[in-house]
Amino acid sequence: MTAPPGAAAPVAPGLWRRLACFLYEGVQLFGVVMVTGLIYGGITQQRHALIGQHGLQFALFVVLGAYFVAFWSRGGQTLAMKTWHIRVVDRKGAPLTPARALLRYLWSWLWFLPALLWAWIGGAHSGPAIAVALLVGVFGYAALARLNPQRQYWHDLLSGSRLVDWPGPVTRRG
């Protein structure tokens, strides 16, 4: 799926488009998270959200990892990425291997972990306080891509992947 010889090298999508894709991905993952929670609660007979929460968090981590690794290694796009015409490829423009997709998933937690750590150290326990910390952290992390000459996120640099514009198939309207 690399560009044809002589074609211009793919460029990174704009930051606002990537953030819009990120937001759309979150909306879609809401369903995945809800179904996972329902199945986990049924299997473990969980009666209260705080009982067994670490097991649920681990289950969500695994399910989300499987979701992203499957989509990124089988075509380089989730549904949200297809909608926003963004594809993830390796440094040479080839599709990601499952191992590289897993590495990208693990490094992508850089989006959230610093903000969650900051909230925890700061003693933020309410939903709104944690949401503000995450919002500031996500925008701060996204802004760091501006420091990279190729405008890639740091987890892409660490995992040997990159986001590129991907126009997709041209459809005729008639």
Image: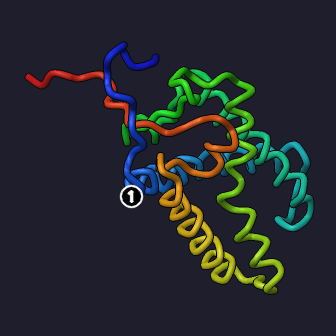
Q: Position of residue 100 (x, y in %)?
A: 70, 30
How many numbered marks, from 0 up?
1
**Residue 58 place in picture, x, y as percent:** 85, 49
Q: Position of residue 122 (x, y in %)?
A: 79, 85
Q: Residue furthest left?
A: 174
* Residue placed most toward the observer, 31 or 20: 20
For mark 1, what is the residue? 16
Q: Residue 52 occupies which quadrant of the picture? A: bottom right
How busy is the neighbourhood of tag 1: few (under 14 within 10 Å), some, or many (20 plus)? few
Colour scheme of this structure image?
Answer: rainbow
Q: Residue at x 70, y 71 (%)?
A: 115
Q: Residue at x 48, y 59 (%)?
A: 146
Q: Is residue 84 visible?
A: yes
Q: Quadrant of residue 125?
A: bottom right
- Residue drawn at (63%, 44%), measured in percent from left and top? 157
Q: Is residue 64 at least partly visible in the picture?
A: no
Position of the C terminus, as image quadrant, is top left
Q: Residue furthest top?
A: 5
**Mark 1 residue type:** Trp
Vertical order, 69 against 49 (above or below): above
Residue 104 to residue 155: above or below: above
Residue 160 against residue 26 in the figure, above or below: above
Is 135 on the left-hand or right-hand side of 124? left
Relative image position of residue 173 (x, y in whole percent): 12, 25
Q: Look at 75% across and 63% down and name the residue there.
A: 113
Quarter of the view holding residue 4: top left
Instruction: Between residue 57 and residue 162, name the one nearer to us.
Output: 162
Q: Secondary structure at mark 1?
A: helix
Residue 5 in the image: above or below residue 156:
above
